[in-house]
Amino acid sequence: MAYVAVEADDRLEEGPEGLEFKSFLGADARGDQRTQPTQSSLDRGYLTDHTTRKGPSGFWTVDYYQPYFDVDTSTVLKRCYTTLLPTSPSYLTILAPSADLYGPFWVPTTLILALFLSSSLAASISSYLSAPEAAHEYNFGLLGLAATIVYAYAFAVPVLLWLALRYIGVGEWGVAEALGVWGYSLFVWVPVSILCVIPVPLLRWILVGIAFSLSGYFLVANVYPILTMADAKATRLLIIAVGALHAGLALTFKVLFFSYYVVPEIGPGADPVL
C-alpha cells in the first residue's frame, strides 16, 4: 500500500472549534434573515414591539387631553358621591391615582341644566299657586346666566388659583387637579337644586346651607394642604378669596334660582296667610 503526502493547510485547525462557516448570501438577505424572528422566539415571548411611539403632543392638540378623559363611568360616579361623604377614607384622595377632566366638565354642565329646569319648574308652580288663571312665561335667559356663572366658577377660579400658586412658588399642584377638585365640589348642588323646587323658603335656605357646607368643606380639605406650602400672608389672602367666591356662589344660586315664592292674594276677600 502506498501513502501520498499531503501538505497541511495552516488556515484550518483540527477540531470543531477551528471550523468557520461563511455565508454566500448578499448583505440584504443577511439583514432580512437577522431581523426575521424565529419560531422559538415567538413561542417564548421574545418578540418585542418595535412600533414607533408618538412623541409628546402640544397642549393645543386633542392627543394632549385624551388621557384626562380616559375614565369609566363607575369611577366618575364614585368620585361624585364621595364628595358627599366627609367620613369616607377616599375623601382626600378622590382624584387618585390620576385626575380626570371628564367629570369636572359634565358635573358643571349637569348643574347648569338642573338649575334652569328646577328654577323654571319652581317659578311655574309658584305662579300657578299665586294666580292660577294667569299664563306663565319661562325665562330662558336663566340658562345663559347659569352657564356663565357655573362655568366661570368651575374653570376660571381653579385656573387663576393655580396660576397664583405658581407665581408664589408652589408647584405641587397641577391644573388638572385644581379643575378636578372644583368640578367635583359642585356635585352637591345638583340634588339640592332639584329639591329646591319645593316652595318652602325655610327648606330652601336649609338646603342651600347644606350644599354650601359640604362643597366648602370638600374644597378646604383638598386645597388647604396645598396652600400651607405658600407664605403665611399669601395663604391667608388665598383662603379669604376662595371663601368669598364660594359664599358668593351659594348666595347667587339662592337669589337667582331658588327665590320663587307663592304670593297670596291681597284684598278684602283674600284668605288669611297661615
Image: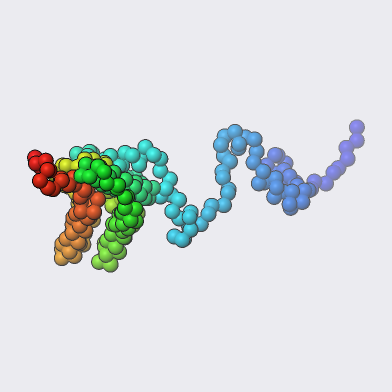
**Measured from the top left, where is residue 113 in percent x and y?**
34, 47
Q: How many marks?
A: 0
> Residue at (57%, 52%) from the top-left corner?
52
> Residue at (15%, 65%) from the top-left corner?
233
Examine the image and state in which quarter residue 207 appears: top left
Q: Tell me, what colour scheme is on the image?
A: rainbow
Residue 76 in view: yes
**In the depicted view, which residue is nearer to us: 66 or 11?**
66
> Residue at (74%, 53%) from the top-left corner?
27
Examine the image and state in which quarter residue 178 appears: bottom left
Is 66 placed left or right of 261 in the picture? Answer: right
**Measured from the top left, where is residue 218 in percent x and y?**
22, 48
**Measured from the top left, where is residue 122 in percent x and y?**
25, 44
Examine the image and state in which quarter residue 227 appears: bottom left
> Residue at (48%, 58%) from the top-left corner?
61
Q: Judge whether 197 appears above or below 144 on screen.
A: above
**In the depicted view, which residue is nearer to us: 147 or 76?**
147
Is 115 placed left or right of 56 in the picture? Answer: left
